Amino acid sequence: MTSPKAPAISPRVGSGTDRSTVRFGFKNTYARLPERFYARLNPAPVTNPRLVKVNVELACGLGLDPDALASAQGVEILAGNRVAEGAEPLAAAYAGHQFGHFVPQLGDGRANLLGEVMGLDGVRYDIQLKGSGPTPFSRGGDGRAALGPVLREYIVSEAMAALGVPTTRALAAVTTGERVLRETVLPGAVLTRVAASHLRVGTFQYFAAQGDTEGTRQLADYAIARHYPEAAQTKRPYRFLLDSVIARQAQLIAQWLLLGFIHGVMNTDNTSISGETIDYGPCAFMEAYDPDKVFSSIDRQGRYAYGNQPRAAHWNLIRLAEALLPVLVDEEGSEEAALVSANEALAGFVPQFEAAHRAGLRRKVGFLSEREGDETLVQDLLDRMATNHADFTLTFRRLCDAVDGPMGDEGARALFTKPEAFDLWAAGWRLRMAKESVSARERAADMRMANPAFIPRNHIVEAALLAAVERQDFQPFEELLDVVSRPYEDRTGLQRYATPARPEEFVSQTFCGT
Ligand code: AMP
Ligand code: MG
């Protein structure tokens, strides 16, 4: 494959020096990589940009002035109508397996990386506009994003961050004043996304598929420098890189499962090298526990069902190992040794995932140590939840109220179609808890940090998006965002947000809306 021809940059740098001037202090390490890694181009301007939201807390953490971002000039930048000082906008090249089928060239078809900023935490972050117009990678798409999916990504990624899950984040959302044509005509929007980087498994596949070993090596070196600098001190830096990505993905997928999160599109181009959750499409949190749960309208075979996510991640990591083979061969001295090395690394995924998942489940039910029989006990609860359609999030949250004794059981047991199913399990749970000497109060407090009260429930997300899209009413979006930004705190008056959908509110499918 040849990389697409890149239009020359012609940044329209802002001339104002007033207080509202946005100073990103962009670094552009990705733009220093060889030209075949991306296409340089500016975002395509939109008709009538209007600010929906600036993420004040995130902006401050990145050393950015939220007021400047919200100023007229800031909004122009966030909409792609003006190129910020120091930005070197580009659309990154990548490939990917989509639902198991390899596509040698995907790339940023509707996104522009503006540059990188250093967070106050010392981490380098990408600032990317998503929905910023067509690029050489658009493959016939319009390069735009609709308001609904932009707000969904905003809400869910911010919820994930607050839940403690590695994720890309939302710095801002603007509407474009333009309409995008999907199944229906929808208002357009641009999301400003912040990521530890936008390197994907698919980025490695892009070079590997072209037999471009030098490109693969440069990309691997970049990934190491940016995410796993310890690798550079080792004898086998590329093996270290592979091990590190595997470890991060194992932790990430365990966290997803522990929160009932279903990504929906775990293609290799949506699998990040930094280990962040990325590319929120038809994602959802499940309500009634069901290991086979699928929400995405495009996932007809349940490839990315809730309980299949560890397998899907492992499959994606095998694709990463394949892409890294040429550089592993150089490192190991022979193809045979490289294969052994890659397989050793890959063998680490399942045990790491299982250990993280088991430990997380123990914490969710309040066990402070690991004892024989724990796994069977926890599995028994999950089985009973599945049979009784118990709400995943609420069952665990209400379990915190039951630590003190059976008088606190009513909330949890009421979630089971046959409440006795909970009673039988709770008896065994109490016997197990009695083996650890810790006060009920302490145990419950720890459990409340592992079991959120609030997740973005699908029917509430849908209602918030509908209000914004159909009535330009952003109040439900703002409220929901506030609720999911403090997921572990009990707050009064928010019962509606913690309650599963009534049958008539039920959301059975989600759409990616691309
Ligand atoms: P996604 O499903 O959002 O992860 O996107 C998969 C691929 O399709 C990526 O290469 C995107 O850049 C591209 N894509 C998605 N939506 C659009 C769009 N509206 N216009 C152009 N490219 C798109
Ligand atoms: Mg994607």
Image (spheres, helix red, strand yellow):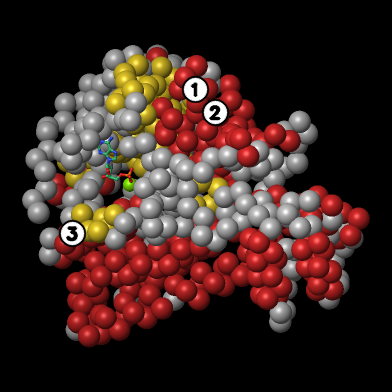
| Callout 2–callout 1 Cβ contact below 8 Å | yes
Cα–Cα span, label 2 and label 1? 6 Å
Q: Nearer the viewer, mark 1 or mark 3?
A: 1
Residues packed near mark 3 inside 10 Å, few (<14), some (14 to 19) or many (20 plus): many
Q: Report the amino acid beneath label 1.
A: Ala
Q: Percent x, y for residue 1?
A: 9, 54
Left-right relation of 411 to 231 = right
Q: Percent x, y for residue 201?
A: 31, 59
Report whether the residue tagged 3 is closer than 8 Å to ligand 1. no
For the point 45% across and 41% down, which residue is it? 510
Left-right relation of 504 to 28 = right
Is the C terminus in the top left, top right, bottom left or bottom right quadrant?
Answer: top left
Report whether the residue tagged 1 is closer than 8 Å to ligand 1. no
Would you place residue 217 above or below residue 22 in this image?
A: below
Cα–Cα span, label 1 and label 3? 41 Å
- Residues 417 and 485: in front is 417
Tag 3 residue:
207
Q: Quadrant of residue 315?
A: bottom left
For the point 22% across and 58% down, which residue is it? 102
Would you place residue 443 above or below residue 498 in this image?
A: below
Residues packed near mark 2 inside 10 Å, few (<14), some (14 to 19) or many (20 plus): many
- Helix or strand or loop: what does disc 1 sit on? helix
Tag 2 residue:
464
Tag 1 residue:
468
Residue 57: in sight, yes or no?
Answer: no
- Helix or strand or loop: what does disc 3 sit on? helix
| Callout 1–callout 3 Cβ contact below 8 Å | no
Residues packed near mark 1 inside 10 Å, few (<14), some (14 to 19) or many (20 plus): many
Q: Nearer the viewer, mark 2 or mark 3?
A: 2
Residue 341: in sight, yes or no?
Answer: yes
- Residues 141 and 320: in front is 141
Q: Percent x, y for residue 441?
A: 85, 56
